[in-house]
Image: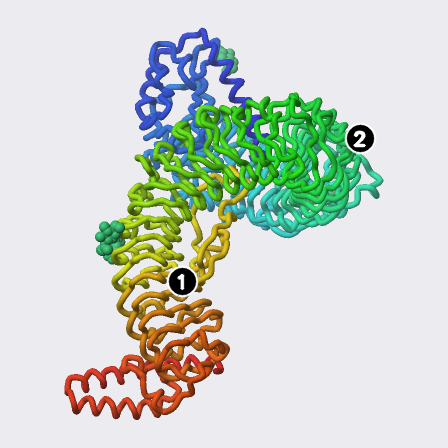
Amino acid sequence: MKEVSFLLRVFSMMVLLRFCFSRVSAITCIQKEREALLQFKKSFGTDPFRLLASWSGTNCCNWYGVGCNQTSGHVTMVDLRNNWLELSTSFYIHYLDSSLLELKYLNYLDLSGNNFDLTQISNVLGSMVELTYLNLSNSIFDAKVLPRQLGNLTKLVVLDLSNYFFYNKYAGLKALNRDVEWISHLSSLQFFSLSGKDLSEASNLMQVLSSLPLLSSLILTDCSLQNNQLSFGSMNSSFLSRIQHLDLSSNNFHGPIPKVFHNMTSLKFLDLSNNKLTSTSIDGGVSSFILGNNCILKALDLSNNYDLGGDVFGSYENESMACRRYDLQVLKLEGTSLKTKIPDWLGKFKDLRSLSLSSSHIYGSIPASLGNLSRLEDLDLSNNALTGAIPTSFGRLLNLRILILEWNRLEELGQECFIQLQNLEELDISNNSLKGVLEEAHFANLSQLNFLFISYNEHLLLDVKSNWVPPFQLRFLDASSCIGCFQGAFPEWLRTQNALVRLWLYNTSISSAFPTWLRAQNLIILDLSHNQIVGPIPTSVGDQMPNLRFLYLNHNLINDSLPLSFCKLKILTEVDLSNNEFSGMVQGCWLTSNLMYLDLSSNNFSGTFPYSHGNLSRVEMLNLRSNKFEGSMPSVLKDARDLNFLDLGMNKFSGNIPMWVGNNLGDLKCLMLRGNLFNGTIPSSLCNLTWLTNLDLAHNQLEGPIPQNIRNFYAMTEKLYAGFSFSREADVAFSDYREKSISQFIKSNELDYTMKQLERMVNIDLSHNYLVGSIPSEISKLKELVGLNLSHNNLTGTIPAEIGEIESLESLDLSFNQLSGPIPRSISRLNSLGDLKLSRNNLSGEIPQEGHLSTFNEASSFDDNPYLCGDPLPKKCTTENSFEPSFTNIENQDEEEDKWDKWLLCIVIILGYVVGFWGVIGVLMFKRSLPTRLKTRFIQQSNGA
Ligand SMILES: *[C@@H]1O[C@H](CO)[C@@H](O)[C@H](O)[C@H]1NC(C)=O
Ligand SMILES: *[C@@H]1O[C@H](CO)[C@@H](O)[C@H](O)[C@H]1NC(C)=O
Ligand SMILES: *[C@@H]1O[C@H](CO)[C@@H](O)[C@H](O)[C@H]1NC(C)=O
Ligand SMILES: *[C@@H]1O[C@H](CO)[C@@H](O)[C@H](O)[C@H]1NC(C)=O
Ligand SMILES: *[C@@H]1O[C@H](CO)[C@@H](O)[C@H](O)[C@H]1NC(C)=O
C-alpha cells in the first residue's frame, strides 16, 4: 500500500483541491444542467450511503460531488468516487444516461470504485469529448466496449483505468489485451494508468504509449508484462527523455534490470517491485544508475524481487563522479537477496525520507553513516542478520517517525540511541538479542511514541519506577517474552496509558493479580497468557474494557468464576482462558455471533454449556476439553456451520451424538468427544463430514456398529492438506493460532500437538466403547490414516483383508475385541507401522513373517489369541493351527496359494455335497478371490518383493 500511496496522495490532493474550490459555490447552476443531473441520478441502482440525497433543490453546484465554474455557473466536475473500495459501498450505475451530454462543459468525471451494469454501457462516454480528467479505476466495467469509445476523448490529460481491487474477469478483457491502438488517439494524455489489466499479448503496447507526445506518468502495475515488451526498439527517444514517473511493479519482468531504464533521463519515480529481476545490467548498480540519470531520481522501488542480488549496491566508493545534490527520497529494496553489508555511502543520500532494506538478507553491523540521513522519517531494517549495536548516531535522526529493527541479531543499545527522537511514533526493536537497560531517561523526549515493540529480547531490562508517568500515550505495546521487563508485577505505569488498543504481555513472568485498575476503553487485544497471574478476573472488566475482542489469559493461575460484567463484552471474537483454575458456569450472554475462537480447556468449569442462552453460529474453533461440563451435546452448536475444530473431550457430556452433528457441521476437521458419557449408536450422518481428518469418540458408552459409509471421510482418503480454514484477521495477534499446542490422543498416545501438526494427523479412535459388528472393509480406503484405534469394543468378524492399503498407518490397535480369522498378510506392507496391537481377540493361524511385519517381535502385540501361532509368540505352528482360516478371508493367503487352493476346493466340494447352497456361494467366493490375489502378487513383484 505504501508504494501506491505517494501517487494516491498526489491525486487525492488534486481532487480535494478541486473539491474545496467548488464546494463553496455561491453561483447558481444552470437549469438545463440541473435537469440533466437529475436524469443521471435515475440511473443509479444503489446508493448505500445515501450520498445522492443532496441531489435536490435548485443549486446543483452545491450537490454532493458536483462542481461548477465559478464565473459561468456551468457544471465542470462530477466526482462520485467510492473511496471505500468495497462493492458493498459502491454505487450501482445501470447505464450512463445521455443526459450527461447536456453538461457541455464537464471536463472532470470521476466514477471510480463503482459498479456499472455491463450490458448497459452506452455510447455516451465516447461523446464526452470535453473531458480532460476521467477516472474509472476500480470500477467494474466492460472493457470490450469501453476502449473504442475512449479513443475519441482526445482532450484527456488524465485517464485512470486501473483496477487493483476487483478481479475483472469479463470477456472484454481479452479484446483490450490485443487491441491497444485506440490509445494512440489520446494525444493530450499526460497521466495514464491501466493497472490490473492483462496486457501480455499487446506486443505494440510500448510503441503506442511512447507515441503519445505528452505522456510523462505511466502506471502499468500488474499487467502481466514481459521483458520483450520493454525493448529499446519499442520506445522512441523522446519518450525515453520525457518519462518521469514509471510504475511497472507486479509484472513478469525477469533477469537483469533491462538497460532501457538507464536511458530514461528524466525519471523521477521508478517502481519495479514485485517482479523477478535478478541484478542490474550496468556496472555500479543502483548508485551508478542514480548518477547516470543526473541524480534526479526521487524514488526507486526494487522491493520483492526475491533473487535480486547485492550488485544493486555496486561500488559507489570507487566512482569518480558524484552528484552535486542528491534527490533520492525513497529507496526500497525489501524482499530481495542482497546478501551484503549495508554500504557506508548510503549515508550520502541526505534527502532520503524513507529507506527499507527489510528481508533483504543483509548482515553485519549498521553503518554509523546512516545517522547522517537527517531527513529520514521511516527506516526499516527488519528481518535480516544485522549484528552489533544500534548506532549511537541514530540519535541524530531527528525527523525519524518510524524505526523498525525487529528480527535481527542486534546486541547493543547505544546509550543515546533514541533519547532525542522526539518525532518517533513507532519503535520496534523486538526479536533481537539486545542487552542492557531501558530507563525512564531513554523515553523522556519520546512524547509522540504510539507503538512500542520490545518483545523477545531475553536480556533486556526495563527499569522504571512504579509511579513513572511516561510522556507518551501508547496505542500498541508488545513486551512479550521480555522476562526482565516487569520484575514479576503487572507494570503500574500502564495506569497512565488510556489509549491502549493492543497490549501483549505474553510470558513476562508476571505473578501478581490481574489489576483492577486497568482501564482501556479502546483496548481490542489483551494478551496476558503464559504468566503466573493469580486470583480472579476483576468484577468490572466488562466496563473497563468494553471493546475487547481478543482476550488471551491462557496458562495462568486465574481462578473463580467469570464475573457478571463479562456479559458486557459483546464483541469478543477470540477468547482463550485455557489452563487456568476457572470454575463455575459459563453464561451464554457473551457467546455472540462475533465469537470465532473459544478455548476454555483445562479448567474446572461445570454445568451445561452454555448455562444460559448463547449464540455460537460463527464459531470456528471450540475447545472445552478437560472441564466438568455436563448435559447433552451443546445444541448451541447446531448452526455452527463454520466449525473446524470441536473438542468436548474429558467432560461429563451424555446422551446421543445427535444427527445434526454430521448434517450441519460440514466444515469439521477435528471432532473430539473422548472421555464423556455419550451413548446410543454412532449416527451414520457423521460420515457426511467429508473434511474430517480426526475423529476421537474413545471412552464413551457408544454401542451398535461402526457406520458402513466410512469411506465418505473424503479428506482421509486423499492427500488434501486442506488444513483448518480459520477466517482470522491476519495481523490481530502475532501468534498464529495454528501454532497453538493442544493436548490430543493421536496414535493412542496423549501428546501436545500444534494445530498445524494436527492438520496432518489423520486419526480415528473409537476405542473403549461397546461397538459391535465387524470392521467395515471400506476402512482400507482411508489411505491417509496414521492412527486407527478400535480397541476395547465388542467387534467381531475378521480384520479387513486390504488393511495393508492404508499406507500411512503408523499405529493400529484392534486389541480387546472378538475379531477372528487370520492376520491379513497385507499388514506386512504397512512400512510405517510402528505400533501394532492385536492382542485379546480370537485371531487364528500363523502370524505372517514377512515384510515389515517381521520387525514386530514383541509377543504382546499378539497375546491372548488362542489360535494364533508362530513368532514372536511362544506357540509354534503345527499343521492343525494353520487349518483354522475362515472362508471369507481365504484371499489373503496368496503365497501358499497352491496349497490353499487345494484345500479350498476340497472344502468347497465337501460343503457343496453337504449343502448345495453353500457349494454355490463357496465357488463364487473362490472365483472372486482370484483377481485380488493376482493383483497382490503383481504389486509385490513390481515392488521387487
Ligand atoms: C470559467 O468560465 C469562464 C467564462 O466562460 C472562462 O473564461 C474560464 O476559463 C472558466 N474557468 C475554468 C476554470 O474553466
Ligand atoms: C468517435 O469519433 C468518431 C469520429 O472520429 C465518430 O464517428 C464516432 O461516432 C465517435 N464515437 C462516439 C461513441 O461518439
Ligand atoms: C542509451 O544510453 C547509452 C549510454 O548512456 C547510449 O550509448 C545509447 O545509445 C542509448 N540508447 C538509446 C536507444 O538511446
Ligand atoms: C443414554 O443416556 C441418557 C442420559 O444419560 C439416558 O437417559 C438414556 O436412557 C441412555 N440411552 C441409552 C440407549 O442407553
Ligand atoms: C447425511 O447422511 C445421512 C445418512 O447417512 C443422509 O440421509 C443425509 O441426507 C446426509 N445429509 C447431508 C446434508 O448430506
Quick check: can you spot residue 4? no
Residue in the picture at 77% in, 27% down: 396
**Three-letter amino acid code at the position of disc 2:** Arg
Quadrant hosting ligand 3: top right
Where's residue 838, x and y in %?
Answer: 39, 73
Q: Residue furthest top?
A: 26
Q: Secondary structure at mark 1?
A: loop
Q: Secondary structure at mark 2?
A: loop
Residue in the picture at 58% in, 23% down: 495
Q: Is mark 1 within 8 Å of ligand 5?
A: no
Q: Nearer the viewer, mark 1 or mark 2?
A: 1
The answer to which image quadrant residue 619 occupies is: top left
Residue 230, which numbered label? none
Where's residue 140, x and y in %?
Answer: 40, 36
The Cα atoms of the two marked residues, 1 and 2, are separated by 65 Å
**Three-letter amino acid code at the position of disc 1:** Glu
In the shown orientation, is residue 321 left or right of residue 491?
A: right
For mark 1, does the 10 Å Cα neighbourhood hold few (<14), some (14 to 19), or many (20 or more) residues?
Answer: few
Residue 324, which numbered label? 2
Identify residue for label 1.
718
Residue 375, placed above or below residue 680: above
For mark 2, does the 10 Å Cα neighbourhood hold few (<14), some (14 to 19), or many (20 or more) residues?
Answer: few
How many numbered discs?
A: 2
Quick check: can you spot residue 855? yes
The answer to which image quadrant residue 893 occupies is: bottom left
Residue 153, placed above or below residue 900: above
